[in-house]
Each structure stands twice: as structure tokens, then as C-alpha cells.
Amino acid sequence: MAEKKKLVSEITSMDVDFAQWYTDIVKKAEMADYSSVKGCIIMRPYAQALWENIQHTLDTMFKETGHENVAMPIFIPESLLQKEADHVEGFAPECAWVTHGGNDKLEERLCVRPTSETLFCEHYAKIVRSWRDLPKLYNQWCSVVRWEKTTRPFLRSREFWWQEGHTVHATAEEAMQETLRMLNIYAKFFEEWLAIPVVKGEKTPKERFAGAENTYTIEAMMHDCKALQSGTSHYFGDGFARAFGMQYTDKNNTLQYMYQTSWGVSTRIIGAIIMTHGDNEGLVLPPRIAPTQLVVIPVAAHKEGVKEKAAELYEQVKAAGIRAKIDLSDNTPGWKFAEYEMKGIPLRLEVGPRDIAEGQCVLVRRDTREKTVVKFEDLEKTIPALLDDIQKSLYEKALANREAHTYTATSLDEMKSILAEHTGFIKSMWCGDQACEEKIKEETGMPSRCMPFEQEHIADTCPVCGKKADKMVVWGIAY
Amino acid sequence: MAEKKKLVSEITSMDVDFAQWYTDIVKKAEMADYSSVKGCIIMRPYAQALWENIQHTLDTMFKETGHENVAMPIFIPESLLQKEADHVEGFAPECAWVTHGGNDKLEERLCVRPTSETLFCEHYAKIVRSWRDLPKLYNQWCSVVRWEKTTRPFLRSREFWWQEGHTVHATAEEAMQETLRMLNIYAKFFEEWLAIPVVKGEKTPKERFAGAENTYTIEAMMHDCKALQSGTSHYFGDGFARAFGMQYTDKNNTLQYMYQTSWGVSTRIIGAIIMTHGDNEGLVLPPRIAPTQLVVIPVAAHKEGVKEKAAELYEQVKAAGIRAKIDLSDNTPGWKFAEYEMKGIPLRLEVGPRDIAEGQCVLVRRDTREKTVVKFEDLEKTIPALLDDIQKSLYEKALANREAHTYTATSLDEMKSILAEHTGFIKSMWCGDQACEEKIKEETGMPSRCMPFEQEHIADTCPVCGKKADKMVVWGIAY
Ligand SMILES: [Zn+2]
Ligand SMILES: [Zn+2]
């Protein structure tokens, strides 16, 4: 298996240089490439297929909860962006500005959307008249642009793909319910489909979305024990409604402001999958979301009947509803093994002349390399069971990693000494004072991740100022 | 039914002012709206749902023929756009230019993609090494921007949504096969799914896509007898390959240029559906592509058991695989009838107390208003049959309209006298000289639509110059 060695040796070990390992995987698994547009990526077919599975799954969950898709314009006039003060302050510094249409200078600059709150606000102000028109539960799938200085594929780039939900409601209560409902949908999706455990919680005021009254988040721990903010859901109160004149007449014929939410996840999800489950042989994809769940590889394919049997098993497996692929190319089995390990395909089915004689084949798990010999007639039963088990194992492994690298601290010094030894999440109390939050970030490099919904009582006082503290915060070095 | 009258009276009659009728439908059926971004539309949920059905159907056809989706950057650097001379000449005048990122002026202007040939070329030049890597059959779904002066929803706007396929091949023959294969897929989709008959043919050199060696098109006739170019497929030869250095090594280890195609359809399709099938009561949607195929409306819903029975029938119909909706709101049946006629829902199921007593309900066709009384237990059989019949009728009606308004002419004078009486397609011979084509356009206002694959011999000579002519061309006033 010289080919395998050669292929694998081109990837940096994750234990030596995690960042380089990540970049190598993105390239070797053919997930993304660069074009001459600085800071923007090309999402290649394999990543696009993964993203389409993500989209399809989430879109179904959104529609089941009454949401409808729309498509808003790609541009935002500068004056519209400026209507909500906090919002423009947050986004204007990273806008890409269109100044010319053809040869003509535009009267007003247009921003390529960094997010579409302002467009949705303008639309809702126009189409909602009475309480009968509420709620409006809209979502859009699109790409957005933010002029970042440093970029990394899927984690931070000048253009990225996402969905942005924007809803308006008659009451604050209903809007808050929606905000939390969508956070829960994200958490469920991450845990059940991506096998990534998340911490659900509320962001501190400092970490809120520009213009939001509350921001809720799901935070995941990557294999290198850094944190990835994986999805956010924002409660806006009636702040944007007041700025944009979004009013409706209630049942008593009185004008009221609408209450609003927004929520989004992006192609960052692909980065999260890579950095949670990948290993030194490449990607490891959770079976429920993998574009291909099983690849059939004939061994000693030149021998009579081997290719034919492989093709037959491929059809058998596909007919059982498994997303399968077969590789009948001239490449050696060793090359193929390495290739599909790199691509993170959950199961490999090997079949050679001896197997055929015995009416069986070999299933190899990508995650553990464990081999199972299976009779042909048992494939329909064994494969789904193995895929389920892989899904479960990946989740448990990621959870174990998070639990092993989550620490508690009661003083700033203790935080620093933990960090000197380990990367990970640190839980501590917090008094609520932004100065203390900033001090922790300054001295440890860790911003607050969130105030988890599942609170614990770690101490009575703030680790910085020593004042009474009743909020537990999770801190972590962030992507 | 005073409400119905009132609602319908808000639409201009298509016989009085077709353009205004179109605009009224787009607005009243809640297909599109404007924002403060001039020339760009908001695609509202109902149009978006229709577009998603279109996307899903076409995407399946693309994948079944071996195509893969990718996502290219939204921007094109000016220098990249300039690499192919004809192409930049065609598109630069309608580019939206990004000149600033945040507060910084960019070193090079970026164009918001009007089409992505240049990006695909750059990518293919990089990733294709040998004949083993060919063909590459990529497609992307996205929006593109062209700075049009005058705009109309779905027909021409500064931003529109589309798919663009871009493929590279080892040989000219294979690329030409792909070009025609995709044109045939478009034609099949239009005729079988949208119930819109199309004329397939080749564009004259004057009407080719900027940079193409051949452009093929499907042309549809709208209800007002004007032509809508509905989808195009381009053969590029190796022109872009030479401009972008797209080479591969063949089986003899010799460097060769790749041969290339591109093909696209856009949200123009929604305009085509409206203008082919709509009537003075609103939209008429072909059942196979309609987001909702049947709406259940209870009559005398305050009477005991009516709402319950309506809900029961709704569940029965949904379980049979029909895309159904039920309206249990307080609005009157008359209001509901008008509303869902406006939305073009193919079938309406009415059920009232007397029907329930007799174990039956009434199905009303949107296209003909024909009523069918159906026993509850026959719904599963009758509804699909009616939907099939509506689909077929719509196609036949559109085809009859086209046939009734397709004329032949042997001289320029004859063309003019036909046009004085009728709008429609005019078939004539053409000598192949661009001067004659331009003269026809100047004098009649009709550009050439295409040289149909199904040629007829109408005369021996060109209607303009009188020279020998062996090509038949279809002419028509274009959207
Ligand atoms: Zn403190
Ligand atoms: Zn002529």
C-alpha cells in the first residue's frame, strides 16, 4: 500500500499543526479551492453536496414549523442600512460597496448584503397591516459578503453561504418563543444529524448581534478544544420596528409595533464537521449527513466475476436506501482505500474472489477501521445498524472530548494556570460587569462563549472583582 | 359574490392592456414586490415556492445526467473578465462594480457576476490535468446582476436567479453533444412540466451569446403572441480554453485544449408561466409544477360538521400524495374562490352540508371552471386524473395559440402586412446575410428568434435580397 502512504503523508498531522491539518484536508478532500477573488472560496462538488444535505434537512425542519422561503435583493442602499444605529455601526466597516452600474456612477452607494435585517424590515413595514397578517415567518438561503481581513475556508471568508430567518410577531412573548424555538432546532440538528454536541446559552451583552436585545447561541468544541460559535438566534424586541416604522393594527384597532427575531447558520457548519470528527487520514463524515454513506470497492477486480459481483452488491445496497457509490476504476484498492478515507465516507464494502466464494464481503468502518464480515443476504440489515452505530459513536467521542476538556475556575489566576496546561472550555461565575469580562479576555485570550441555559453554582463570587456573582459563564478560545 | 367582483375588478383585462395585466397579476398573486433597491425584486413566498419546484425538477434532471453542483464566488476581478475579448465587450457595460471594501479602496475593481464563464474557466484550468479528469459537468444555482435600464419583474431585472451549467470536454463532438443534450432537457422540462410548447433551434450569429461559437435556444409564444427566449445552451469550441490556457494531456501525452459549453434558465420561467397560462381571473398554474394543486374550501362552514368534514377530506387528499391546502378562515367562500383563482391553484374542492349528506363534494377546475361532482371514496382516483387532464389541456391550448399565430412570408412587404394585422411568429427563408436580418428587424421590429431544427421549405429565395436562401428562420417580437 505504497500509494496509501504517499497520499496520506501529504497531510500534516493534526497533533503537529492543527491549522495546517485543517487546510490540508480542505484541499485534499476537494472541499474548497481559491479563485483569483481574494478571500472568497469556491465550494467544490463534494462540499456543495454536503451543504445541500444540510440545507435540505434544515429547510424541512423550518417548513415543518411554518416558515416560508423568500429571496431578497442582493444589495442594500446605504441610507437603508443606516436606519438602525447599532446595526450600521456593526456592519458598515465590513461592507463591500457598489459605486458604479455599467459606466455610470450611482447616486447612492449600494452595499452587497452582509445580512438582510434592513431589507426584511422595509418589506414587513409594507406588507403587514393588521394582526391578521402576523406572524410572518420568512427565511432565505443565500450568500452574504463581509470584508474580513484574514480568512480561512468555511470558517471565515469574504463571501459565505447561509440561511437567515427573519420573523415578525404581534407580541414580545411570541417573538421570544420563536427565538428559542429556532435555537432548539439548531441544537437538535447539530446533535442528531451532525453528531456534534453543543452548549446552548445566551450571549453576554458585549457579544450580542448588532441591534439585538438578546442573542442566543450554540457553541461547539472542536477536536483541538477551541470553541466554534455554530449558530445564533436573536431577539430584537421592537427596536428595528421603531427604526423602520413597522406597525400593525391590533384587535382593538390600535397601532402597535411588531416584535422581531432573526437566526442563522452558515457554511461554517462544514468547518465544524471537519474539525470535530476528522482524523489524520482525512475527513470523517457523520452517516446521516454524508453525501455518500458507503463505497463499494472490488479487490482483485481483474479476476473473473469480481467487478460484476461488486456492481450487483452496489445495486442491492442502493435499493435498500443507502447512499452508495462504486469505484470500478483502474486505481489499486490501496489507492481507493486512502481516497475514500480522505473523503470520510462512513463505510467501505470490500469484495474479492475469496469472499464471493463464501457468499460474503467485508465492511470497514471509517471511524474505528473495525472490520465486519457480512453475508450478502444480511447487508440490508447490517449496514443501517453500522451507520447508526457510527453516528452514535461520533457523537459520544465528541462529547467525551468536550467533557475531558471542560474545566471550572474560581479565580483569574486559576484560569491562567489551567490555560497554561490545556486548551478547553472554562466555566466560572461572573458578576455581570463588562469590565470583568474584558479583563478575562485580555489576560487569557478567552472571550465569553455564553451563559449556558444549564447553570451550575461554581462559587459565590466573580473570579475578577470578587463581588457577588450568580451567573455561570463558559469561556473559550474562539475560531 | 360581491367580494369576488371587487377583487377581480382590480386586475386590468389582458385584452385591454396585457402589460398592465401582467403587472397586476404579479402584485395581486403576491409573486413579487419592490424594495428600495431600484430594479431589483423581492421574490415573495408564493413565487419562491414555485421557483423551488422548478429548481428541484431541473436539478434532478441535471444530476441524472451526471452533473454536479458547485458554488463559485459572487465577484469577478476586472482583469479576469477581460481575458476573453467578445465576452467582456458583451458584459462590461452592464456590470455592477464594487470599488470599496469597508473604508478601503480596492486595488482592482470587482464585478458582481453577470455570468460566471470566466470563473469556471480559471477553475478548470487549475483542476483538470489529464484526459482522466474529463469531462467536468458543473452547474450552479445563484443570482446574477446585470445593470439593465428598464426592468420588469421576472422578465428583466437587475438581479435575477438562475442556474448556469459550465462543462469541459476532451473533444468538440462531446461538447456539442452536451450543448444539445441540455437544450433537449430544457425543451422537455418546458413541455412536460410547464405545459409550454417551445421551438428549438439555433440562434443566428448576430444573436449569439458573447463569446460562443453557437447558441441554441428554446423560444415560447406568450398569450399576447410575443416571443420569450426561455432557455439557451452555448457551444464555445475551444475559444475560452485558448484565452484562459485550459489544457489537458491526452492519452498520447500531448497537450490539448478543452472544449466547453454553458447553458442556463432563469426566473424568467415564472414570467413565461404567467404569460402563457394566465387569464383575467389571475394566474393559472400547471398542476405538475404548482406549489399547491388543490385547495379545500368548506361552504356554509358554520353548519355543524362542515369544517370537520372539510378537514377530513383535506387529510384524505394529502395522504393520496396531492399537494393540498385548506382554508378554514372566516373569509366568505366567494372571497376564497376569487383568492385561489388569482393564485392559479389548479383544482378547488368545495364541500357543504348538502354534499356531505349525499357523500360527495364538488371539484372545480381553474382552467375551464368545469365542475365535477365526486363521491368521497372516488377522490383518490378522480383528482390525479383531473390534474393530468388540466396539464394536457394547458399544453394544447398554448400550442393551439402558437399555431393560430404562426405565419409564413416570402417577402418583406408580406411580413409587414401580416404584422399590421397580427402579432405572432413569422417564418421565412433567409440567405444568411446579416444585413438582411438587420433590415427585417429595422423594418418590422422583429429580431430573428432562431433557425428551427425542424426546417421547412417556404421559398427558394431570401425575402429581403432575393438571393438563394436555404435556411428557414422564425421571427417574432421579443420580450
Ligand atoms: Zn466581576
Ligand atoms: Zn438576403
Image: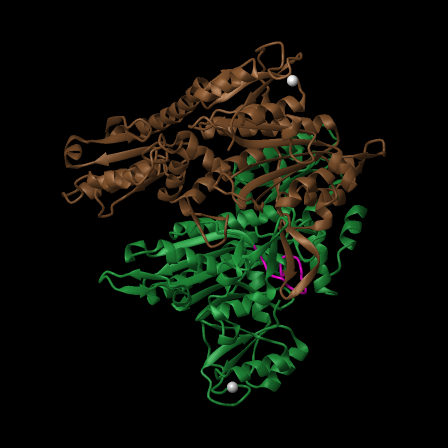
Chain colours: A green, B brown
Q: Nearer the viewer, residue A265 or B365?
A: B365
The residue sitting at 28% across, 38% down in the picture is: B8
Seen in the picture, residue A19 relative to B287 is either above or below; the reply is below
Q: Position of residue B375 (x, y in %)?
A: 23, 28
Is residue A467 visible in the rendered image? The answer is: yes
Q: Where is residue B143 in the image (x, y as percent from the top left)?
A: 56, 46
Residue A151: say if magenta.
Answer: yes
Q: Where is residue A444 in the image (x, y as percent from the top left)?
A: 63, 80
In this picture, residue B29 sits left or right of residue B465: left
Residue A338: say if magenta.
Answer: no
Residue farthest along the bottom direction in this orientation: A466
In this picture, residue A2 sits left or right of residue B59: right
Give residue B385's quadrant in the image. Answer: top left
In this picture, residue B299 sits left or right of residue B216: left
Give residue A419's quadrant in the image. Answer: bottom right
Residues in magenta? A144-156
Seen in the picture, residue A267 relative to B51 is either above or below; the reply is below
Is residue A290 visible in the rendered image? The answer is: no
The residue sitting at 70% across, 30% down in the picture is: B213
